[in-house]
Amino acid sequence: RLRPRLRRVLSARPMAACMTSKMAVAPSRGALARKVSVKAARRNAIRVRAFAPAYDEVFDGNSGQMEKVLSQSIESISAGGLEWSYRVGVPEEGTEAKPTKVLMVHGAGLNSFTYNKLSRELQKMGYTTFAPDMPGHGATSKPTSGFDYSAASYQSALEAFMTAAGIADVEDPVDMVVSGYITSQAALLLAAANPGLFRRVIVMNTPLGPGHKLPDPLAVYTRPFGMGKGAQADVYKLAYFGNEFAIPEETMAKYEAPYAGGDGEAARAALEASVTKNDLKALTSAVSKAWSVRGLPKVRIVWGVNDKYLGDKDMYKWAEDVRATFDCIRSVGHMPQEDFPQEAAKFIGAYLESELKVSALGSVRLGKVTKDDDYQR
């Protein structure tokens, strides 16, 4: 059972966290070696080129001047027959770099910008982050043939991107953060199929059970008799209505930008195809089945419990079924990376650095959580 804790007030947002811990089982030799593609990635992996820290200039209302704020550079690469755009976040000079890189996969309808703030917090901790615009999203290619926007296509494309970017290496596995719908679930399927490429996985507010449905801005494309065909991409509603706090206008413009201008119709059509090519119930079931076996990367769920789209009941059940650990963040909605990136990063960073002690597993096997054995909050 969850045991609520009082937490100190953080700025104007009162917050409490509910936690419990369940230990994942160490990967088995069979699971690590059962995919030929993992071996191929090891042979073909290239060295990640050096990136410099990037900064944005923002207006500081207190000083009345423009200030430099740590950000990510926008890079491009060819992979799997597609032209990819992706964000690379590097720690500031003087910050001790962590050895493990972090891959961040956004959900359908959004783009890599959604991780701008969360990435910044992880960069401050010393992590280097890679956040691609998935095919059909952001500034990445929006093919009309040769890529059908199914979960399998997204899965293959993401693996190709990782190889081209030099982060597909069983000797140097990455940590991965996923959130949102469809593309994130394809990323989870990739990690389950190629466990040697991933060290740990963090799941933030992603459909995990039969009770999780598409939100209206995506469900419109599934209306019977094709009544939703050609519907406008309502990214404003998709990004805004599931959250606890308002998203600033300038931030929302970043989410809406791919659906305007010359590529707007291509982006809209790609979003529609992503929804219609993937039955959410079947996809969620496939993810649950894939993660029900032993020998997979350790999983931590970081969940905003005030999500207007996804209830937490299915999340708890999934965590129990796949033996994942979880942190519940109160007063945070569907996008923890937007609602409270500092708090989300704190949980993620602590998990990535934790040792996952066996004593935590013992407490769960007794049917109760006696204390937080995982890490100090």
Image: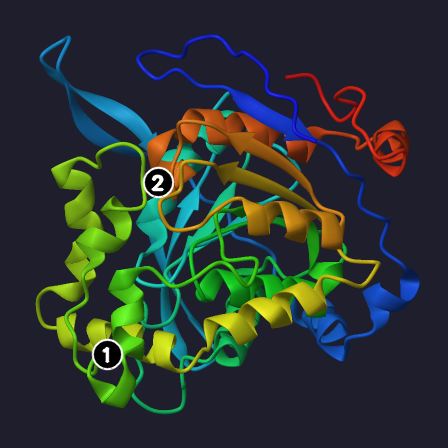
Local SS, label 1: helix
Q: In this rendering, which labeled residue sits more in front, label 2 or label 1?
A: 1
Residue occupied by mark 2? 116
Mark pair 2, 1: CA separation: 25 Å
> Residue 223 at what x, y percent from top left?
27, 79
Local SS, label 2: helix
The residue lying at 34 percent from left, 17 percent from top is 13
Amino acid, disc 1: Ala
The residue lying at 21 percent from left, 57 percent from top is 235
For label 1, the crowd category at 10 Å Cα-Cα, with few meaning under 14, some 14 to 19 and many 20 or more, is many
> Residue 194 at what x, y percent from top left?
71, 67
Residue occupied by mark 1? 269
Amino acid, disc 2: Asn
Residue 138 in view, yes or no: no
Asked if the residue at tag 1 contacts the one at tag 2, i.e. Cβ–Cβ closer than 8 Å, the answer is: no
Left or right, residue 131 beside residue 175: left
The disc label shown at residue 126, or none: none
Left or right, residue 319 beside residue 276: right
Q: Quadrant of residue 167?
A: bottom right
Quadrant (top left/top right/bottom left/bottom right) for the C terminus: top right
